[in-house]
Image (cartoon, helix red, strand yellow):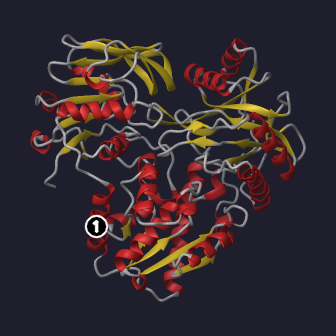
Amino acid sequence: MGRERIAILDFGGQYTHLIANRIRRLGVYSEILLPTSSVEEVRDAKGIILSGGPSSVYSEDAPPYNPELLRMGKPILGICYGHQLIASFFGGEVVPGRWREYGIAKLKICKAIGIFKGLGPEEDVWMSHGDLVSRIPDGFELLGMTDGCPNAAIGDMRRSIFGVQFHPEVSHTPKGMEILSNFLDICGCKREWSMGAFLEEVSERIRREVGERNVLVFVSGGVDSTLTFFLLNKVLGKERVLGLYIDNGFMRKGETEGVRRFLIDHGLDNIKVIDASDLFLSAVEGVVDPQEKRRIIGDVFLSVRDMVLSDLSLDPDKWMLGQGTLYPDIIESGGSRHAAVIKTHHNRVERVKDLIEMGLVIEPLDQLYKDEVRELARLLGLPKDLIERHPFPGPGLATRVLCSYGEDMGDSGEKEGVLKIARDFGMNGDVLPIRSVGVQGDSRTYAKPAVIWGRRPDWEELELISTRITNEVHGVNRVLYLLIPDELPPLKPKKAFLTKDRLDILREADSLAMDVLRRHGLMGEIFQMPVVLLPLSSGGEGECIVLRPLESKDVMTARFARIPYRIVEEMAREVMKAGTFDAVFYDITNKPPATIEWE
């Protein structure tokens, strides 16, 4: 493309594209390539970054790669799996760790040189790994360590080859951008890429991919789909674009009318609103498995789209599907060659993939993350209240109403480990008989949540407890803190599915919780706050509620939000008014090891 670039070799990590994002935000163009790329494909790159990934370097199914790329003499930075690959390739050793390491860790910097230039003696870093480098290769020196990883950062200063076990690309490694910037300096890069350059490129891409066709755009009212709708209107003209808002019955209280009014008030009046709630609800009747639920919902979205095209006598071959898909949706759906499927997003079901293969889908934002989308929206002058709107998944509350056949899940030994760690902190602990989706070591987990209760620790101590439990107790990927009542009641799964009655209960609970945030001026401080309904009861009609306030920038990583306790307690009391609840919990798990949504 005639510009300086960094080559990123993709080993299937959940954060591979986030590395590319961060390099671009530092003003240098980046390109993601297969690890098997030829030397010729990488020859003009200023440097090479090896991504993370879900595999082990010593396993038989480790991703293949071209070893000549590591012998080219270019500066190299290995991250997580890439760090382990560098150690293994140059003669070191990689072994399974005694325990897993997820979330925040303290990095003790041995030498503030190379990629660590300008950093202090200790820095917070974000970990997500099970293996570790047990022996450093000859010619490398130790640059940093953590309590759980003795060789967390290594470097060969002579050849400008570095490896870090942590993830500098995520926003929860505070000095991560400085580390990546130091690497770009080592590569001798200029800083010439910008979001303005992306806007020019994406506008040209829209014209090229759409050609003479028109676009029917799925619009949910969030910043991703609304920005997509705005961009397509801007580039193609309103007469060639039709927005489609589908009320799937999984929307928040008052959501549909609020979105319709907002779009029309801001000139995006080429929008059609469809109520298809009965169709969606009947399609998911009796479904429990979260992957199946997402697949069905994605299919029904396309069926409604086909009905609209037919009703309006529009030729499907002349009308592309427009979606506000972001890169996290793609990577979590297993969208790169070596990536694991964490959860299938509604915009990545098989029928959508078929349309993509046919060239009938346009997704202008599919290379971006949430923070970049908001930056682009600001550049284009979209309203602040849209830009800062809390993200809301396409399947809506369907991912927040957990379902169950009511079967007894049994005890696989997790309770003993959780209770031991809880007691170390003077608290009680248990495991709930239900499962949720997580992401650990770049792979999907579907495991039980732990719950702790007793005294009222500060948020930092709760994070420490949560991290220890998810690192040390296999079969647990999420930790909750009990808000109401004071002691955990005996909870068992109850037979419960995705029904309008349960959705209405969650709608009201969600509305009450959001009202508390607004009342205290916290909507702008919180990135997102899923409220989740669990089919757990101590007998009778009761269920359980989980509050999941989060801090994040890019969706790929997140920390549970530190809301003042008095406000959390107020929120819990308000939520209790929405229905009969046996317990209210606060989700104190970061991402990883838990995903943002429970399903």
User: How far across and down, in percent of the image, does residue 566 sit?
Assistant: 79, 36
Identify the residue at image location x=43%, y=82%: 238
Residue 320 is at least partly visible in this image: no
Q: Secondary structure at mark 1?
A: helix
User: How far across and down, in percent of the image, does residue 103 sit?
Assistant: 51, 28
Residue 225 is at least partly visible in this image: yes
Tag 1: amino acid: Arg
Q: Is 221 or 503 nearer to us in this picture?
A: 221
> Quadrant of the image for the N terminus?
bottom left
361 sits to left or right of 220: left
Identify the residue at image location x=37%, y=64%: 364
Q: Image height check: is 98 above or below 272? A: above
User: How far across and down, in percent of the image, does residue 201 sit?
Assistant: 27, 63
Identify the residue at image location x=57%, y=34%: 590
339 sits to left or right of 65: right
Identify the residue at image location x=31%, y=18%: 112
Name the residue furthest right: 540
Q: Image height check: is 436 above or below 468? A: below
Q: How many marks?
A: 1
Answer few, some or many: residues within 10 Å of disc 1's Cα (few below 14, many 20 plus, some between 14 and 19). Answer: some
User: How far across and down, in percent of the image, does residue 544 sit?
Assistant: 79, 42
Mark 1 — residue? 205
For residue 589, what is the image quadrant?
A: top right
Q: Image height check: is 481 above or below 422? A: below
